Every structure is written in C-alpha cells, then in structure tokens.
Image (cartoon, rainbow, N blue to C red):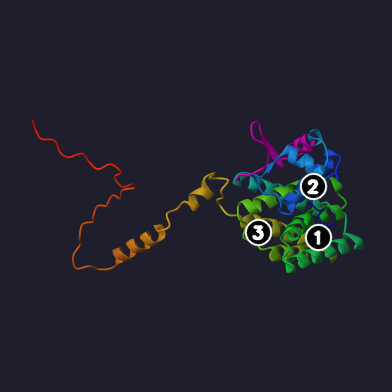
C-alpha cells in the first residue's frame, strides 16, 4: 500500500483518519521531531472542525506520537536518546516474538506481498524519492506483521516504526537506505525457504544495526545546538590552526604575547573638552 497523499480539504471527517494521516507523514519524513501541529491549520487542511482535530491529536498523544504544551499547542514528539533505545528494544522484542510465534512457513501470497514491498523499496531508492523510500522502509515491518496474520501487532509496530523514523532523523542515523532494503530482502528470502531461525537472526541483526548507527548527540539534547553552531566565529578554525602551527614551529626568540587592541565601535561624535587649569 503506497503512502497516502497529503490531505486535501473535505477529505477526512473522522479522528482516526486524521491520526493515521499524521503518522503516515511522520513515516515518510514529512513531519519532523518537534514540529508544531496547529489545530486550526489542520482543521483547514482536513476540512473539519477543530474538535475533531483535537480528538485526533489526543489519540496520538496517548500513542506517544505527539505532545501538548499548555501555552504553545501540539508538537511532534522529540524522543531522548534513552527513549530511542527503548523504542528499538521494544521493536526487537515484538518483531522477533512475531516470527517465533509463526505456526509454520508463510503462505505464498504473503511471500509475494513481501517481495513486492521490497521491490518498491528498491524502486524508491533508485528514484531518490526520499518520502516514498522512508515510508516504505518503515512500513516493511508493518507489512511483515500483517503477512504473519497479526493485525493488532501491525498497528503497534506502525507507531513504533514512526517513532524510530523520527529517532533516525533526530540522531542522524548513518544506516543507509540501501542497506536496510538489502537486509529486508534477506529476511524475506529466509522466510521463503522456511528457515525461521535464520529469519529471526537476520531481523535481530537488522534492528540492532539500525539502532547501533544512531548518533550519540542531537540538537534535542542541546536546545541551543543549532544556534550555537551557527554563531561560531568565522575565524575560530583559522585561529586554532595558526596557534597549532606556531606551537610546532621552532623560533629563535620567544616573544611575550601582545595584548589585544581594543577597537572602538563608534567615533567620537562630540570632541573631548579641553583640559581645565588646576586651581
């Protein structure tokens, strides 16, 4: 199932549909961690009342996808690094447990569906369609749960994969999309041959690898991080390099450092008064 397009007015009239659209947008990378979700703007987009929008956002809050600030409104969640680890741990337990619970090999229609999903991932990667690629890579795990016949787990995994999509962006994951796609293909190949233990091992390694490639720091840990980086003095790097060069270059005579000259910001608009004679 392809990601649903951006909502147009009058298209959505139920809170559940609005919530699903927002989660799809997170999976596709169209909504970023910390992004504000204005009630009136969403009501205008979906062609519904603010009451329905508020109910949808309340549902998403209960699912851990958005949070509300009493003064500023609704925002997409910004998971901490500890919460990121918990999310991947939850996915690992649920998804490997799902495969452990299989009564036997997946039926052929389910394998065909998974293969088709991987093929669409590959096509999105070749086309450099970032939104489609992101959505499909996350939705593979939802599709796997559906193919295993567990719709309830598929719904839970959709929320978890949306959270880990936010996490991968927030913490600058270095795990390439092509690697994820190749790992998905290996999992499907193992399931096709009925090698359940290998499929479980591959899935465990896949989730662990994605989690491992998360950065250790993000602007969520330092609210001033982006501004701090932007305001670094332009000559800071050159000054540090020059200092290092001076430290390693022998000199015949060591001279004491000169005190920095103080530069005036403004010229004297009023000339100084002449000195007064002493009395």
| Residue numbers of the magenta segment | 53-80
**In the image, is 94 to the left or to the right of 243?**
right
Mark 3 to mark 1 CA distance (whole Å): 20 Å
Judge whether 19 appears above or below 191 on screen.
above
Relative placement, left or right, of 178 versus 51 is: left
Reading the image, the residue beneath label 1 is 196
Which labelled disc corresponds to residue 209?
Answer: 3
Residue under pointer 2: 21
Q: Nearer the viewer, residue 158 or 259?
A: 259
Q: Is residue 117 visible?
A: yes
**How far across and down, in percent of the image, does residue 144 sit?**
82, 56
Q: Can residue 194 be seen in the rendering of this structure? A: no
Figure quadrant of the C terminus:
top left
Percent across and percent down for residue 156 are: 78, 45
Label whose residue precedes the other's in the sequence (1 or 2): 2
Q: Residues within 10 Å of mark 2 (few under 14, many from 20)?
A: some
Disc 3 crowd rating (10 Å Cα; few below 14, some 14-19, many 20+) is: some
Q: CA distance from mark 3 to mark 2?
A: 29 Å
Q: Residue at the far left: name it.
A: 279
Q: Is residue 134 left or right of residue 169?
A: right
Sequence-wise, which precedes: disc 3 or disc 2?
Answer: 2
- The local secondary structure at tag 2 comes to helix
Q: Examine the image and state in which quarter residue 187 appears.
A: bottom right
- At horizontal 45% and vertical 53% (from top left) the residue drawn is 232
In which quarter of the view is residue 39 placed? Answer: top right
Question: Which numbered mark, 3 or 2, is in the foreground of this view?
Answer: 2
């Amino acid at each position: 199932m392809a990601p649903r397009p951006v909502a147009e007015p009058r298209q959505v009239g139920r809170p559940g549909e609005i919530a699903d659209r927002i989660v799809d947008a997170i999976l596709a990378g169209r909504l970023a961690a910390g992004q504000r979700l204005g009630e009136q703007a969403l009501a205008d987009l979906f062609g519904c009342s603010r009451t329905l929008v508020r109910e949808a956002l309340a549902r998403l809050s209960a699912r851990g996808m958005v949070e509300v600030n009493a003064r500023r409104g609704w925002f997409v969640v910004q998971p901490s690094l500890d919460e990121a680890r918990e999310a991947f741990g939850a996915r690992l337990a649920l998804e490997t447990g799902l495969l452990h619970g299989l009564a036997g090999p997946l039926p052929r229609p389910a394998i065909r569906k998974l293969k088709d999903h991987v093929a669409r991932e590959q096509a999105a990667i070749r086309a450099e369609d970032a939104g489609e690629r992101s959505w499909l890579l996350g939705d593979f795990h939802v599709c796997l749960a559906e193919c295993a016949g567990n719709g309830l787990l598929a719904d839970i995994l959709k929320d978890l994969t949306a959270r880990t999509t936010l996490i991968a962006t927030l913490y600058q994951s270095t795990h390439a999309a092509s690697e994820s796609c190749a790992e998905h293909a290996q999992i499907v190949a193992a399931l096709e041959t009925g090698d359940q233990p290998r499929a479980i091992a591959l899935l465990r390694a896949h989730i662990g690898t994605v989690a491992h490639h998360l950065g250790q720091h993000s602007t969520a840990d330092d609210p001033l991080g982006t501004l701090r980086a932007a305001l670094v003095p332009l000559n800071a790097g050159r000054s540090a390099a020059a200092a290092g060069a001076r430290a390693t270059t022998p000199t015949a005579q060591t001279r004491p450092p000169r005190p920095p000259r103080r530069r005036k910001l403004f010229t004297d608009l009023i000339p100084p008064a002449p000195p007064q004679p002493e009395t």
